[in-house]
Image (cartoon, coloured by chain):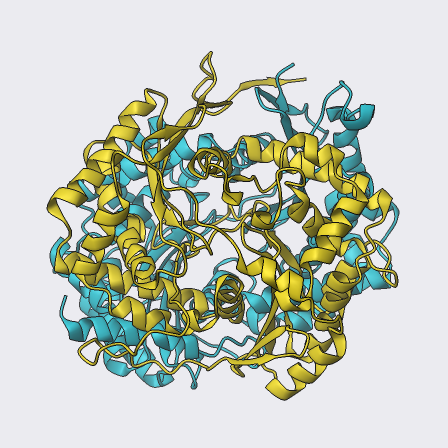
Amino acid sequence: MFRINPTLLTLTVFAVGPLTIPPGRAVAQPSPLPAPVPSSTPRLPVVLPTPTLDVLPNGLRVIVVERRSAPLVALDLRIKAGTAYETVENNGVAHFLEHLLFKGTPTRKPGEVDAAIEAIGGEFSANTSMDWAQFAATVPASAWHTALEVLADAVQNPAIRAEDLEVERRVILDEMASAENDPTRAPFHALSSVAFENHPYRLSLYGPEENVRRLTREDVLAFWRARYTPGNMTLVLVGDVQRGDVVNKVRALFTAPASPAAAAAAASLPDPTPLTERVRARPLQRDRSLVTVTLGFRAPSVKAVADSVALDVLLQILTGGGRGRLNESLVRDKKVALAVSASYLTQRAPGLLILTAVGPRGDPQVLEEALLAEVRRLLEDGVSDAEVERARRAALGQTLFQEETFSGQANALAFYDAIDTYEYSVRYAEQIAAVTSQDVKRVIRTYLTPERYAAAVMMPRAPTPPSVPGREASR
Amino acid sequence: MKRSLFLTTVFCLAMLLLARPAAAAAAPPEVITLPSGATLIISPETDSPLAVIDIFFRVGYAEEQQAAADPGITSLLSRAWISQSEARGEELLGADIVALGGNVGASFGGDYTELYAVTLATEEAFQKAAQTLILNVIGQPTFPEAAVEEARQSQLRALQLENDQLLADTLSRLRRRLWDLSPYTRSPLGTPESVRAITAQKVRTFYNKYFRPDRAVIVVAGNIPSERVRRIVEANISASGWAGNRPKSPPVAALAPESLSQTPPDVNVSRRARITFMMAGFLAPGTRQAAADYPALLLLEALVGGGKSSRLFRNLRDTKGIGYEVGSLLQPGMYQGLLAGYVATVTSSQQGPNGAPLSNPSDVSRSLIAEMKSLAARPPDEAEIARARALVKGRYALRHERLKERAFLLGWSEVMGLGAAFDTTFDARLDAVTPADLQRVIKSVLGGNHVLSMTLPEP
């Protein structure tokens, strides 16, 4: 999954063993769920806590997993209110709204929403993606009622005061300035802008700077009214709770009426135009000493479950466990790259399989060619059964590691429910275990086409900055 | 890969889901000094299907200076450690690790180096993990030339990547200016020159001198009877010859903390970017010298910039709209720590949106430092302290969701001089901090001089 979070400062510990990477996993199967996995497939000796679903009369979906192994409860509210629901004119409004929601309500002054959750030992996190907005927290089990009350108040009754709008406008401009230099976010946006011609996925999370400066309180409220309706929401609670208590509490707190129009809008999203050639974003010149090359290949949507899961296994073959083909080839053997990555975010509509290489100052074409050489090797030589088996294990391990925590499981359930149904998360392990080398070869042939992809490059500005960045001086 | 192994691994990983992620009800750990001199900490978790063996050494990159070793050798050693042993070649050791489920790794900090494995909580699986880690990796590592060279290349790449990161670079410059003679002034990864100078023989010498049983803290957490844990650990130490005839390691040095007699000049770097990243750092008491003050230090960090109700977040970002990334960090050290506040924002003398003037770097840095120091002038009230206390407790509880992390926190607390019991009595220790304790720590930290490190846009 792809999240944008404030930088975390954890520099005291330098892990050199297996790294914990948030899974870029994709899953899903069209509804109704596919037939059970054939009996020849290894069955998983796993008894996972089972989620329950209750749909309230106003359309709000409530998913509960009762896990009593810790006195904690993870809450995750996912709303079909991401960037893909914007237009060119209001691009940036979903993210702007995410910033404003916790600034207060008619009964809570600025700062009181966060103070209320922190007073019980929790912290709200908020994220916006293409398909959804997320608000989440993990709190002591004894205080989940309080957390839910605060969350319900914040998303249903945001004050969106004019003065808060101006303060957050400036914060967002700061966030955009930070993102400009970010070797992940900036190339991703550049890539999307050329890979999704005339499709909502081309819109940037922040929107253009002129939109951020121009958006009004009424623009933000209009988006909130249109999208923040119960039928567009999934609320997941995982932890030491009882389903009946949760449903009753949610029913009492989320009282807005159903909005059929909003739900209908959530269902319609066209597929992007297929990539028919190589398309390139304008090179980004930044004050960095390294070159980043990012290639995006059209990837399946959440509806194409077999392909989606097979792609997750392919990701492990490419870069799993800090090794994988890209690492062995570009970093260890050819020594043209310092780091490589492969990612794929499952979305409602077809998205991108992204290959990235970071290398020292030099010709970005070298990195691009090295990535393409590995793509061609996959097409020509395929993958071995042993490689696929190792990759399946790694994909599964990554998933289970994520869902070990309450917040990890809540995140997975809410994520899939916002783009299709939470049941895909439940079936994911079985689906991964069923992937064969033929499946992986099929997705390689279908999606990895060296003649049809989008490319974005971030490179150092000229003149060259010194290898130890910047000029150091005292004053 | 055989299907049975696949299923074993899947089973092992799946059991993670069923592990008890609670800190609250943890039984007190048993702390034993073994005949070899190693400390063994056993944390019985009878309802956990997993077991963790987490081995700490009281040696980190801060020790490199004492040892007159090449900077970066601890990092390189960690990277080359799990390669081969006297009895197990690369392939066999690799197979051992795969058989354990692959969840084996190493990490290091200023004051420790760590090696760990997660496995099933059966005696057979635990015996295998102990054999792999203690008998082979700890007891008889060989650090072959090829593994050291591969580790060197990996570390050189990490250095290049780190230099390209704004935050890491700003913090690194702050640390260099904050400390003068202290080993904490060093870069954990060393420099390209020092890393190139490290040979396999130097790694072996450093290892043989410092990675001795008397510096080892072995944590075992999981559902294995204590007596069996002790017997298996001792048997593997004995079989390895690790505790044999070689001398003990030098005693852990008691380094005197440094002080900033005056506020040194700011450390400024220009980059051609629109964003200014600034960080103000203060020296903080070490965890060994001032273990009793560590809970108060955690509260102080939460008050300064932890969460969205902290002073920095409320008064800089929420009220003035300064900065998207606003917060604080605490880097604890055994001898001395670092408390820093940071802001990333667009600064300029030019006009900003809607014709309003943008903040200039001097104004923002003054605000940053003033907000931090305001805790001394305007002590936090009861509600502010209660909020910080709840936040610190909540964050600490979340760190206990995984068995591996629970084992880590026991070992880390022990090697940092806080004692393993610190982890299991955390909430009570936090509750015991009085407003007077807090104010004393606030004054001792924020009443001192500071270092300001800024990465500025080029004029």
Q: Quadrant of residue A230?
A: bottom right
**Where residue A81 appears, x then y in whole percent?**
62, 55
> Which residue occupies the extreme top position in the image?
A463
Relative side of B128 to A60, left or right: left
**Where residue A409 appears, x then y in whole percent?**
49, 70
Q: Is residue A158 above or below residue B443?
A: below
Which residue is at a point 43% across and 21% down the rendered structure image?
A467
**Where residue B355 appears, x then y in whole percent?**
82, 23
Which residue is at a point 53% across and 30% down the rendered structure image?
A181
Q: Quadrant of residue A105?
A: bottom right
Which chain's colour is yellow? A
Please tell me which residue lies in front, A146 or B80.
A146
Q: Quadrant of residue A174?
A: top right
Please tell me which residue lies in front, A302 or B358.
A302
Which residue is at a point 17% across and 75% down the rendered structure image?
B4
Shade of chain B as shown in the rendered figure: cyan
